[in-house]
Image (spheres, grey):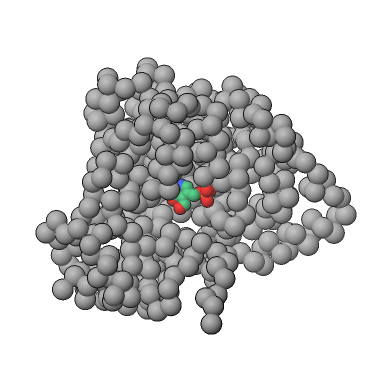
């Protein structure tokens, strides 16, 4: 019998509990919200969203989105300063295309989101990594590297970082913006987890600084609604927006995802997005506790800080254990995780693993940790 055809990126062998998966759980994908919005939109009998879209993104959609963001961020965002992307991955790829050339240096955190590193590799960029601690990127390490390199941009995940779960402090955010002006590099702030905070308000988003030509804030619906939408945004100053909208890709193909934008617009305007985020944060807050309790109970020797939002625990293994080797044994015990080295741009972090508390039900999270414990014994 042939294997079932893959229908999503989530492709876990039967029986395996993959605590590495960084995708939202299927039961929390918002079928009903999108169905209602689509029905309303189609009933209007106006096919505008089936036409090539305006380069910057549908203006009504942008307006709905900036209204939502202004309330969520606590400061105003402007529709003129927003560009609609097909998600953060697309935004990063486009930024690399338009703002860099092969061989240019860029800066990332150590650790950083492993799949962004793949995008940077596709563009032939030289990646230099900056140290991080409990408060995110270490400013002294950044300053050291700014003395040695002239980076085109710094890629940073300031809030509930993937994989470390850490949040960059407010003071460091402000200092970073100053340094970007002094040394003339761009800050690409990937703020995908900003609205997934479970117990306190995160520091002010980088979106607050985007009037500055050096700062771009990248957002996405992947974590707050659904990744299959392939929809996101960039908030940036006018010159950067102009550069984005003037590119050949948009001249030929028009604005990105006008159809999806029209469907999601209704979800925002009806208050559905806000409700959905409340539903997600409620569910994820309790799953976070489940993973934390399971680790305390079954793996007391594991070292980690409890994140205050996002998707992940970044766990240091005891006795300098190599997580890539451990993975082979883990798979025999039908459990998986992401080895730390994948998040390193200098072949480090071998004794870390990334665990997600998002995808599974509580019993499965607990069972996954029990299997990990068995693997470590
Ligand atoms: C930090 C970070 N950035 C970007 C993405 C991908 O975003 P998108 O689906 O909008 O391309 C992810 C998904 O895991 C992520 O963790």
Above or below, comparing residue 307 to residue 28 in the picture: above
Quarter of the image where one finds residue 360: bottom left
Q: Is residue 35 left or right of residue 203?
A: right
Q: Quadrant of residue 30?
A: bottom right
Which is nearer the eye, 171 or 313?
A: 313
Q: What is the total number of numbered labels drawn onto the structure image? A: 0
Question: Which residue is painted at 77% across and 41% down in the image?
Answer: 52
Residue 190 % position (x, y): 46, 41
For the view shown, which residue lies furthest in the bottom direction?
A: 1
Q: Residue at x 24, y 55 (%)?
A: 352
Which residue is drawn at the image coordinates 61% and 30% (left, top)?
244
Instruction: Measuring from the top left, give residue 245's x and y in whole percent.
Output: 65, 30
Residue nearest the observer in this picture, 314 or 251? 251
Is 24 on the left or on the right of 67, as rendered? left
Pick the residue in front: 6 or 273.
Answer: 6
> Is 177 rendered above or below residue 48?
above
Quadrant where the C terminus sits is bottom left
Q: Residue 73, how many percent across, how many down?
A: 51, 41
Left or right: where 48 falls relative to 230: right
Residue 302 can be seen in this image: yes
Residue at the image point whose x is 28% and y is 53% from the top: 340
């Amino acid at each position: 019998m042939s294997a079932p055809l893959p229908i999503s990126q989530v492709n876990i062998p039967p029986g395996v509990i993959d605590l590495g998966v960084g995708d939202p759980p299927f039961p929390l994908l918002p079928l009903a919200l999108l169905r209602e919005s689509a029905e309303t939109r189609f009933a209007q009998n106006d096919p505008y969203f089936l036409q090539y879209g305006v380069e910057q993104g549908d203006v009504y959609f942008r307006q709905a989105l900036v209204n939502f963001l202004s309330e969520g961020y606590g400061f105003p965002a402007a529709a003129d300063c927003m560009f609609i992307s097909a998600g953060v991955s697309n935004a990063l790829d486009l930024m690399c295309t338009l703002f860099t050339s092969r061989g240019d240096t860029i800066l990332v955190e150590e650790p950083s989101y492993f799949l962004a590193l793949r995008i940077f590799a596709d563009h032939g960029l030289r990646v230099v990594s900056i140290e991080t601690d409990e408060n995110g990127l270490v400013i002294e390490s950044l300053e050291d590297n700014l003395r040695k390199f002239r980076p085109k941009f710094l890629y940073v995940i300031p809030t509930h970082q993937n994989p470390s779960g850490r949040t960059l402090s407010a003071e460091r955010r402000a200092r970073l913006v100053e340094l970007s002006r002094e040394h003339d590099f761009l800050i690409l702030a990937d703020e995908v987890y900003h609205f997934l905070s479970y117990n306190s308000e995160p520091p002010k988003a980088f979106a607050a600084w985007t009037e500055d030509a050096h700062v771009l804030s990248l957002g996405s619906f992947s974590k707050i609604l659904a990744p299959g939408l392939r929809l996101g945004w960039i908030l940036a100053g006018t010159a950067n927006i102009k550069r984005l909208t003037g590119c050949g890709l948009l001249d030929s193909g028009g604005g990105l995802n006008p159809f999806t934008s029209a469907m999601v617009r209704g979800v925002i305007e009806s208050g559905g997005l806000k409700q959905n985020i409340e539903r997600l944060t409620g569910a994820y807050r309790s799953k976070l506790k489940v993973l934390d309790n399971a680790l305390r109970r079954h793996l007391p020797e594991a070292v980690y800080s409890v994140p205050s939002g996002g998707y992940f625990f970044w766990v240091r293994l005891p006795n300098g254990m190599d997580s890539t080797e451990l993975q082979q044994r883990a798979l025999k015990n039908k459990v998986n995780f992401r080895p730390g080295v994948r998040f390193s741009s200098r072949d480090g972090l071998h004794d870390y693993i990334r665990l997600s508390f998002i995808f599974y039900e509580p019993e499965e999270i607990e069972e996954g940790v029990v299997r990990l414990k068995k693997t470590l014994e």
